[in-house]
Image: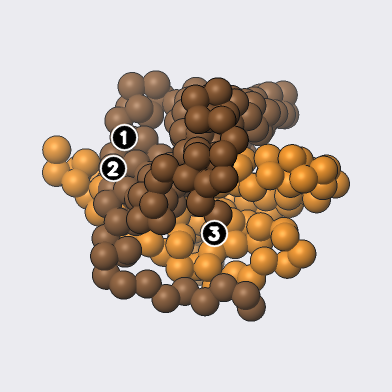
Chain colours: A brown, B orange
Amino acid sequence: MKSVVNFDLGQVLLIAGGGFAGSVLRVLVSGTISGVSGTLVVNVVGSFLLGFFMYSLEYGGFFSRNVRLFVAIGFCGSFTTFSTFALQSAGLDFTGFFVNVLLNVFCCLLAIFAGRSLSIFLFGRGAGWS
Amino acid sequence: MLLMVLVGLGGGCGAVLRYVVSGFASRWDNFPSGTLVVNVVGSTLLSVAVYIQPTTSVIYFFNSGLLGAFTTFSTFSYETFRLIEAGRWLLAIFNVLVNLGLCITGVFVGRWFVATIVFGL
């Protein structure tokens, strides 16, 4: 067991605050675009944000650890969802299942790559926070 | 408006729980097992919560808020991408397949649990 969880109340509130905002926005989006398309949209947008943020953190070093708790773990983690994706996929027919799974996996991996590319384009690859 | 506050409160709880649970799950040979654990547990619980058909407030707080935030697709994608970037293609493919396989299985287990244990007895 490598990691031991120990954090103060401030860190808990940062994660919870990001989780609050991310969840509300996810439900608002899925209220506008219902069904599997809404879930695909939040997953792709959230993955792009996370990719951009994490690589900016690594290469640029602009954001502090506390911002990471709020944006990466709180907001992006809560804005995207695996549970709804799994439930919706299980309810589709054979073809729909594979289309939905492949779309989510490939579009989100591409979104991470796009976020990484934007970060390198904007900030380069300096020695950042690690 | 009140329902959105319920979603937010559930989401706040879910995000903190995800951080705690995935922190306790150890990383085995750089395999992101913490995210796998939260996704499988969250997908199974969501299936139970959906088929049990709770009231609207519970759906917004627990299903949409807490369990939606507890599981994550962005971190799953990011961790898979890092494995690909590191040239560990097999581990990346394994990560995708095991997340998909166990979470979908969790959905069926949850549905079975509600049908036979909760409503069946």
Instruction: Name which quarter of the figure residue B2 lies in.
Output: top left
Judge depth for marks 3 and 2 and give the one in front.
2
Identity of the residue drawn at 50% across and 30% down: A123
Q: Are marks 1 and 3 on the same chain?
A: no
User: In the current view of this chain or complex, which residue is farthest to the right?
Assistant: B90
Identity of the residue drawn at 50% across and 39% down: A60
Identity of the residue drawn at 54% across and 59% down: B38
Q: Mark 3, chain letter?
A: B
Residue B32 location, x and y as percent?
Answer: 66, 57
Judged from the image, the secondary structure of the residue bearing numbered disc 3 is helix
Residue A51 location, x and y as percent?
Answer: 54, 36
Residue identifier under label 1? A25
Kind of residue sitting beneath label 3: Val
* Viewer-nearest residue: B15 or A120: A120
* Viewer-nearest residue: A74 or B120: A74
Residue identifier under label 3? B38
Judged from the image, the secondary structure of the residue bearing numbered disc 2 is helix
Dot 2: within a 10 Å radius of its alpha carbon, few (fewer than 14), some, or many (20 or more) residues?
many
Q: Mark 1, chain letter?
A: A
Q: Does residue A20 lie above or below A6 as drawn? A: above
Dot 1: within a 10 Å radius of its alpha carbon, few (fewer than 14), some, or many (20 or more) residues?
many
Judged from the image, the secondary structure of the residue bearing numbered disc 1 is helix
Instruction: Name which quarter of the figure residue A1 lies in.
Output: bottom right
* Viewer-nearest residue: A117 or A85: A117
Kind of residue sitting beneath label 1: Leu
Residue identifier under label 2? A21
* Viewer-nearest residue: B111 or B19: B19
Disc 1 and disc 2 in contact, CB within 8 angstroms? yes
